[in-house]
Amino acid sequence: MTWGVEGLVVRLGATRAVDGVDLVAEPGRVVAVVGGDGAGKTTLLRALVGGVRPTAGQVRAPERCRTGFMPTAAGVWRDLTVDQNIDFVAAAYGVTGPLLDRRRAALFEVTGLGAARSRLGSQLSGGMRQKLAFGLATLHRPELLVLDEPTTGVDPLSRGDLWRMISRSAYDGAAVVLSTTYLDEAERAAHVLVLADGRPLLAGTPTEVVRATPGTVVRLDGEMPGITTWRRGHERHGWLPPDGPAGTSTDSGQGVAGVLPTKVEPDLEDAVIAASLAREAVDA
Amino acid sequence: MRAMILKEFHELRRDRRTVAMLVVMPIVMLVIFGYAANFSVSSLRTAVVGPDADVLSVAMKVGAPLTSLSPGMGGTPLTTDEQAATDALWNLFDVVRTDVSVSGADAQALVRDNVADVVFDTSTTPTTAYVDGSALFAAQRADAALGRMGTLVDIQILYNPDLKTSWVMVPALIGLVLAFIGTIVTSIGLVRERAAGTLEQLAVMPLRPVDVVLGKIVPYLVITTVEMAIITALGVTIFGVPFRGNVAVFALGALLFLGVVLGIGVLVSTVSQTPAQAIQLAIMVTLPQVLLSGFIFPLEAITEAIRWIGYCLPMTYFVQISQGVMLRGAGIESLWLPFTVLAGMAVVIVTAAVLRFRRTLAGGRS
């Protein structure tokens, strides 16, 4: 059984937060929804779990008791202890008795939360809190697992832990849909959907998305007029549209300070930035 | 739903400020309002009963000499000043009923059932004036005016013989605490969930909206009921306030009133984004109830336009019920009006609150 949305439009007030988006979530597969702030990631995920009504289009999702949702920067009751959080969510999803004991033990084993079981949600570190939130969202082993920015604001080590937990859920057969602003994370997903202003920008496997990069991504050693650049590690990358930027061309090769743009193989981050710039150029 | 209620209690226990408010506010109010200020009124609803009721009633209207209180005594002509003073005195008594067939215990019943603030019973010699001590401000004024009639009238202050402010304040205070706690704490409980982002999660969990709403309301219903019992007990023991009426009638009134204030709390929470906003709004809707429900400023003394605001506030009716039951031992028959109004308000507000809250849960962000 596959889940997802088709031609989804969600209007929030006057704005179209999501505007014609398709997404397919299959068991055992992780789909990453990528995009900047206000791109429509959260609205898309909330529509998928039934938290917001679609204006148009189809939403296919299992019943609520077979769906798991982890909202942005929340999902944990801050005035409840770790154990009380687990008890409440377990009761809501009807997980009881020995099954609950086993799941609780499994969660403590993976996350190390057992040592903090009587601590309040508000007293947990950011990473621990996100791991608990993930644990709560998956306590009932949902068929569809929806995670809204699960790793935002989490240290690199905890991010690694969270990704191990996410991969484990997918391996166990859950269809996972998550949003992220980290493109290196999105590369670990089976399928990537890039959103900009509520509209789909790119979609496919990470390789397909990279292959579809519009124009040319180049490496520069300094600023160059007419070219938008971004920093990648110790390098600076720039984007040249397919038909060449106005007033410059790759052939002339000479920058103001004598810098020479060199063509590079784009990765996912380059691809997303290039696609955004191409979209802006078209919209302008 | 049990899980929701348990969770709410666990969360409430951790919220020190709210717990402090639950404990401190009733004590502060009990101290402050137990010793509140007095105000006077300019007119007293008066009934004249007994065999000579019609004579006395007419005498009052025309401003006859005070000797009219004892028919047959006759009188000497009054000076102009004395006549003016007499007129002013009689003007205070606004006759709402004249009945020659009532006397004695039935005359007292007119006071108990709040037909009049003062009842002149001419079946005794001298005429007895029964004064409703539970209508404190009216009673104080009546006591002063009747005192000037000297031995011509026997003053009997019923239900609050020493005219103690605390006796009328404590029943009203019960309503005040219910209103504050019910409205403010309920709205905080819901808004806290929204501000923390966990309302989103509740909305997509397999909980019925009615479970979420009731899970949120029931804990506060329990808490406010306990608080009400404690304040009532404190009022009776510390201030010696009598509890003359039927506890069940009182409980029914309190339950209806709680339904209204908890409903208002839920409504406040659906239009507030943060606990601070919720508290502001809750205070805004609660403050008029303190000032305009007739227990600090007598409703009869308020300008007519503003008085109508008072008539729209649930507290006005709860105060009538609590004072009536506790002090006068009034039954549900004589309190049918406040009971009917409160019941109507409870139905409308609770329905509106549940509908709005369901929309908040289903419709995502507002």
Image (tube, helix red, strand yellow):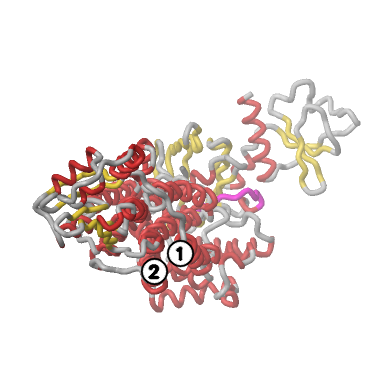
| Identity, as a three-letter code, of the amino acid under mark 2 | Gly
Question: Which is nearer the eye, A226 or B20?
Answer: B20
Q: Nearer the viewer, residue A143 or B322?
A: B322
> Which residue is denoted by mark 1 in the rendering?
B30
- Contact between labelled residues 2 and 1, with CB atoms less than 8 Å apart: yes
- Extreme residue in the front direction: B76
Q: Which residue is mark 2?
A: B235
Q: State whether residue A92 appears in this view.
A: no
Q: Quadrant of the N terminus of chain A?
A: bottom left
Q: Which residues are magenta?
A: A176-184
Residue plotted at (84% across, 34% down):
A223
Which chain letter goes with mark 1? B
x%, y% of residue B8? 44, 65
Q: Quadrant of residue A210?
A: top right
Left or right position of B40 against B255: right
Residue type for callout 1: Leu
